[in-house]
Structures are given as C-alpha cells and as structure tokens.
Amino acid sequence: MLTLPLLVAAVGKLEMQYRPASVKIGSQEWSAENLDVTKFRNGESVMEANTAGAWEKACIEGKPAWCYYGQDAVKAKGLGKLYNFWAVVDKRKLAPEGWHVPTDAEWQKLADELGGSDLAGKTLKATKGWKNNGNGDNQARFSALPGGYRSHEGPAYYGGPFFEAGAAGYWWSTTRYLVDNSYCRMLSFRNNRLEKKSFVMTSGLSVRLVKD
C-alpha cells in the first residue's frame, strides 16, 4: 500500500501525463472538452482561489489561479475549471507537451473552417445543456458547453461574481488586447455565432487547447 506522500506524488504524476480527448477540425486538432487540471506541465500546482478574497488577491498580485463556477465542484461537473489570464500564459504551461492554449488567430482559423464566425457556433455547441434549447448539432464534435465566466467583482456587482452558466461559454486566447485585456471567444444560446470578445485578465474563463 502506498503511503500518503507516495500516493500524492503518484496522483501528481498522473495529472502531469494528462492528454486531452481531441478532435480534428480542418487542419487543426482541438481538445474536445474544457481544461480541468490543477497543475502546470512541470507538476507545480495552480492555486485554487476558492473565495472572492483569494481570487482578488491572486489577480492583484498577477498570480495564476483557478476556480469552479459558483465555487461548486458538483454543479460545475463536466464544465472544467475557470482560469485567470495569468494561468493561461504562465511559462510553466497549463497544456501538456505537444499542446498549447490557442491564439486569437487560431480561434479565427477554427471559425473559418466551419463556415465563418456567424455560423461556426452551431457545429461547435453540444446537443444539450444550453438554455432555452439553444443547442447546436455538434457536427464538429467540439462539444462546447455553456460554462459561464467569473468576474473579479464581488456580489455587489450585479449579483456576481459568476455569470451566464447555461447561457454562454467563454474561452481564453493568449492574444493580448490593450493594457489589461485579452481576446477570447464566446458561444451563446441566442445564436450560432463564434463571437470574438475581449475580457479583462482578472476574469475567469474556460480553456481549450490546440495541438502544436
């Protein structure tokens, strides 16, 4: 039987060996589910910011952090984790060897492969889980789910910090925009668009990976 230290080491080693389920879309290969890891490629931990104060502190200090939507692992099952921008661009890498978090240009290439930004959402969205039956047909087997996002603001900000689970999904790119923002992509129950947005780096968004 493994002692506790050896068991922890074994679990850490297994996570370092994580390889995402994937799907080929045109000339790209994408992960087929939202990222759900707690360690960087080298085995070092990404901090779980499981309170509003912890999230705010990590973002003020520019430190990588993750959380579950609503701080509830059960309700967030299947949605992966929400990461701040510092986790996405950390030099220790969230992605396993051979993978990376996509750039804005790589997201655009995905959209172009699926008929353009105005149409790509239909083939990317899962066939269930979207508000008001705003599902897709998932022909691309991307299986996108509406995981929502985390704001850095507290409950006084329109009842935050968590918004839009069931209604929309947001995914980081590594491409910066202005001083403290980065481009991302959004899917919504309202339409079939893969929409380009920008979010402040203190937000918590989902992450997909693309093959090197």
Image (spheres, grey):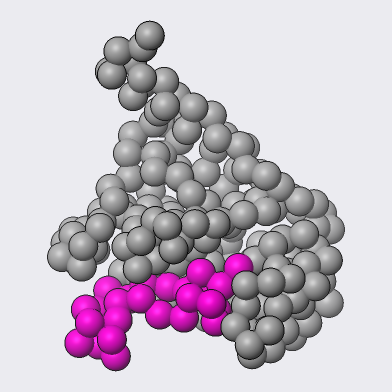
Left/right placement of residue 190 relative to residue 127 reads left
The quadrant of the image that shows the C terminus is top right
Query: Quadrant location of residue 190?
Result: bottom right
In magenta, the rendered stretch is 145-170
Task: Name the residue located 27 percent from the left edge and 74 percent from the top edge.
Answer: 152
Image coords of residue 185 (percent x, y):
57, 73
Taking the image as shown, residue 197 lies to the left or right of residue 203, namely right
Residue occupying image coordinates x 45% and y 61%:
76
- Residue in the image at 62% along x and 78% along y: 130
Name the spot of residue 5 as percent of width and height, x first.
28, 18
Displayed quadrant of residue 3 = top left
Q: Residue at x 61, y 37 (%)?
A: 19
Query: Does residue 209 appear in the picture of this structure?
Result: yes
- 212 vs 3, nearest the viewer: 3
> How many discs mark residues in the rendered view?
0
- Can see residue 198? no
128 is within the stretch colored magenta: no
Q: Is residue 29 above or below residue 187?
A: above
- Seen in the picture, residue 11 relative to 114 is either above or below; the reply is above
* Residue 17 image offset from top left, x and y in percent: 54, 29
Residue closest to the eye, 69 or 204 = 69
